[in-house]
Amino acid sequence: MAVATGNYQRVLRLPGVATLLVLMFAARIPVAATNMVLTLHVVLTLHRDYGAAGLVGAVGTIGIAIGAPLTGRLVDAFGLRKMVFVTTIGYGTYWLTAWLLPYPVLLVMSFVGGLLALPVMSVGRQALSALVPPEHRRTAFSLDSISLEMSFMVGPAVGVLIATKVSTTAAVISVGCLLVLAGIAPGADRAHLKAPALPQRPAAAARAAVQTLCLPRCREPHKLVAAGDIGIDRGGADPQYGGVNFVLMVSSIDIRKNQTFLLPIWSRLIRELGREATPDLLLIGKNGHRSHEFLSLLAESAELKGKIIVLNRVRDQELAWYYQRALFTVFPSLAEGWGFPVAESLSFGKVCVSSEIDSIREVGGDLVSYVAANDVGSAYKLIKGLIVNPAERARLESLIANRYQPTQWATAANVILGALSNTKTAR
């Protein structure tokens, strides 16, 4: 019977996902080997019975049960990176010294080690959540579950092999070294996962922040875009880029913003439409997480040289100039909180080709042209159609002009305050 693998292939093609799954598979192998290695060490090297070995495992499990909520609180208070640092030091030290300990001390230290156990299972899930858009997370978590099961197939077998063919001391030290490596593995992508400190009263703090930051802005006079007051100043400025035929993307140069997705599309446009007929792609935004990967790919492509332009520092007035003159905008982001660039594009009456995620639909409704963030073929057809068919662009721009209503700062603030008030009432 044929197995449908399309969803899995789409997830694995997302930037960073395949690498993360491989690294988490490797990082979980020593965790899977811990119980087997400890059991063999107690029996074969410390010359105790299996009941004594089971007691060490049980005490360690109790330590993990107590320590897991504590590490969760540590994440809330200090962030994931600090928690991983502490648990890597603590758990690694326990395993690197366990082979030296007599049984009574090992029994006590197994509890301490459990308290400081490195949470590689949950770290992997958090990393996937950061890399994968919501609509693909179920598939990503299925792949992670497969990877986890494979780790628990390989880990105990490797532990037994080292313990019986070399020594249990070598097995214990190997587990310790691998756990330290798992704690410092770059694939955990912890830049995405730094958890903010939680205020003691989050609802009250959030309400104060909204009143401080949003409502005063509603009362200030601004020269703002279109009919709303969420946007950027209009005004004249000498542009850094003076082209007249270009498509615009406004976003930090970041792996989550998915600029790499656009490279094969522009290469194909150049091949099929010709270099002169293909508009430039103007990317505006500061360098962000793993921007060097995209910039390296761009620098290596002679075909795209001069057709994809990156500007890191642009003032609001100059940005308005680009919005006004762009053919349309693109925004293939993998994850968004709200999507300001889409709102700005619509405020300037420009068609936006965006990834199909819920937060963008909240901004643009049916006025945005949506495409899956990993479907290069469909995105190419949509972008090419907008380039070669000015009449279709004009039709969509007319719909935007007639129907788009920018969200007001006051409206956004009042919605948040209302939700916080309802939460307080419910309590």
Image (cartoon, rainbow, N blue to C red):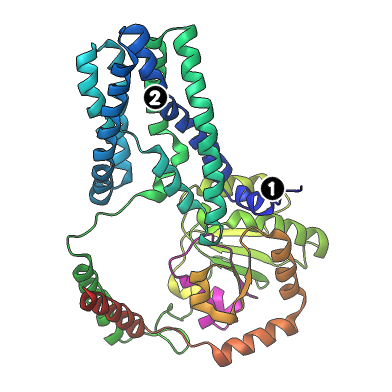
Asked if residue 30 is positioned above or below residue 275 in the image, the reply reads above
Q: Which of the marked residues, 2 or 1, is nearer the chain's N terminus?
A: 2
User: Gap between marks 2 and 1, in whole Å?
Assistant: 47 Å
Secondary element type, mark 1: loop
Asked whether residue 195 is in view, the answer is yes
Amino acid type for the residue under numbered disc 2: Thr
- x then y, percent, for residue 187: 47, 39
- x then y, percent, for residue 288: 46, 53
- x then y, percent, for residue 33: 43, 24
**Magenta region: which residues?**
322-350
Residue 34 is marked as 2
Residue 343 on the magenta span: yes
In front: 376, or 344? 376
Amino acid type for the residue under numbered disc 1: Ser
In front: 380, or 139? 139
Asked if residue 335 is positioned above or below residue 42 in the image, the reply reads below
- x then y, percent, for residue 337: 43, 66
Residue 301 is marked as 1
Asked if residue 92 is positioned above or below residue 81 in the image, the reply reads above
Q: Residue at x 24, y 39 (%)?
A: 66
232 sits left or right of 91 in the view: right
